[in-house]
Image (cartoon, rainbow, N blue to C red):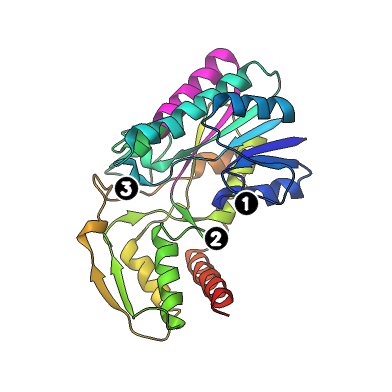
């Protein structure tokens, strides 16, 4: 069986590829980065002709579409590019898959599409209310996928992934940003001052390793055209998560709030239910938040120590 992953060298893609390999899949993929793996191609999937020629060449049994513009904040700066990257590319892949009998497709969605809610945990049946160009782009891709699945018979599997983090995530996101800065402080590479944005935002974080397992199980046991929350069922303020990270260092840090780091139309709280995913696939989160945060910090400790030496 051949699995093709867009964003295969990215954060979730790396962990998913390992799971698929362990389950007997041949892994192929495309990335904007160079790779020593001959099955991973460097290229831009926004180029429809290139993408189609690559898929025709590989003829995968399943496609995992993970590549996306993922920054909610930056989506306000590049709304058209965000919608193109996250919706139009998804549409192109759906169009390729629909005429290939037996080929399955997974599309990564986002819990951000729920917008601001008043009751928790959020279930898949709850109202969708995109509040940012990012969440709108994910909503458009999901709604189109549901249409393709129900009306054209295309096998498309969908997730609404809430926040996920862990070792290897880029430092443009909040947890790896904190982790990297703390590791730099330990190594004497920066002053013990941490600039932060909105610490009151409350989010549901799942470990990336659990998230990758959920993606795999959705395509193995889930229902086509049915979105599944990937969530931990618990939520923490960013301030609480930072406090946990600070437990793992033995020095005092000065916290400075930076208003410029606040996001436009920031959602107050996200907390998802994984009941549907558990009922259909047996998935549940296994890695607790403290382990995730400690592993994230240790990742940056090791990475920066190796770079320093």
Is residue 161 found left or right of 119 in the rendered image? Answer: right
Seen as rendered, the residue at the extreme top is: 151
- Given residues 244 and 91, the one toward you in this image is 91
Give the alpha-carbon distance from disc 2 to disc 3, as whole Å: 21 Å
Tell me the residue that label 3 is attached to.
73
Q: Residue furthest left?
A: 259
Q: Residues within 10 Å of mark 1 (few under 14, many from 20)?
A: some
**Mark 1 vs 2: CB contact within 8 A:** yes
Asked if the residue at tag 1 contacts the one at tag 3, i.e. Cβ–Cβ closer than 8 Å, the answer is: no
Q: Mark 3, residues whose alpha carbon is within 10 Å: few (<14), some, or many (≥20)?
A: some
At which x and y percent is residue 124?
Answer: 43, 35
Identity of the residue drawn at 56% across and 44% down:
32
C-alpha span from label 1 to label 2: 9 Å
- In the picture of the structure, the residue carrying the numbered disc 2 is 168
Asked if the residue at tag 3 contacts the one at tag 2, i.e. Cβ–Cβ closer than 8 Å, the answer is no
Residue 208 figure quarter = bottom right
Task: State which tag comes first along the sequence, 3 or 1.
Answer: 1
Q: Is residue 49 visible?
A: yes
Q: Secondary structure at mark 3?
A: helix
Question: What residue range appears in magenta?
Answer: 138-162
> Is the stretch drawn in magenta largely helix, strand or loop?
helix
Q: Secondary structure at mark 1?
A: helix
* Badge 2 density bin: few <14, some 14–19, many ≥20, Cα 10 Å: some
Using the numbered discs, state the Cα–Cα distance from disc 3 to disc 1 in whole angstroms: 24 Å
Where does the C terminus fall, quadrant-wise?
bottom right
Q: Identify residue for label 1.
A: 14
């Amino acid at each position: 069986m051949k699995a093709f992953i867009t964003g295969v060298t990215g954060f979730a893609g790396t962990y998913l590829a390992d799971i698929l390999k362990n389950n007997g899949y041949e892994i192929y993929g495309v990335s904007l980065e160079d790779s020593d793996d001959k099955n991973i191609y460097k290229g831009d999937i926004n180029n429809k002709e290139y993408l189609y020629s690559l898929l025709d060449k590989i003829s995968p049994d399943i496609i995992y579409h993970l590549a996306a513009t993922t920054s909610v904040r930056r989506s306000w700066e590049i709304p058209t590019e965000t919608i193109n990257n996250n919706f139009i590319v998804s549409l192109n892949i759906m169009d390729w898959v629909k005429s290939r009998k037996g080929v399955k497709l997974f599309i990564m969605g986002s819990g951000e599409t729920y917008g601001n809610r008043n009751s928790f945990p959020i279930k898949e049946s709850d109202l969708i209310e995109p509040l940012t160009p990012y969440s709108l782009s994910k909503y458009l891709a999901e709604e189109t996928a549901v249409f393709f699945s129900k009306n054209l018979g295309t096998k498309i599997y969908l997730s609404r992934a809430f926040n996920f983090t862990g070792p290897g995530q880029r430092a443009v996101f909040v947890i790896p940003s904190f982790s990297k800065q703390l590791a730099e402080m330990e190594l004497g590479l920066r002053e013990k001052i941490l600039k932060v944005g909105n610490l009151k935002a409350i989010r549901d974080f799942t470990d990336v390793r659990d998230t990758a397992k959920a993606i795999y199980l959705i395509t193995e046991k889930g229902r086509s055209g049915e979105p599944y929350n990937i969530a931990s069922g618990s939520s923490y303020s960013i301030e609480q998560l930072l406090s946990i990270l600070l437990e793992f260092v033995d020095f005092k840090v000065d916290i400075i709030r930076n208003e410029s780091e606040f996001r436009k139309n920031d959602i107050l709280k996200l907390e998802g239910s994984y009941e549907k995913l558990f009922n259909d696939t047996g998935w549940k989160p296994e890695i607790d938040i403290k382990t995730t945060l400690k592993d994230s910090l240790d990742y940056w400790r090791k990475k920066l120590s190796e770079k320093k030496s």
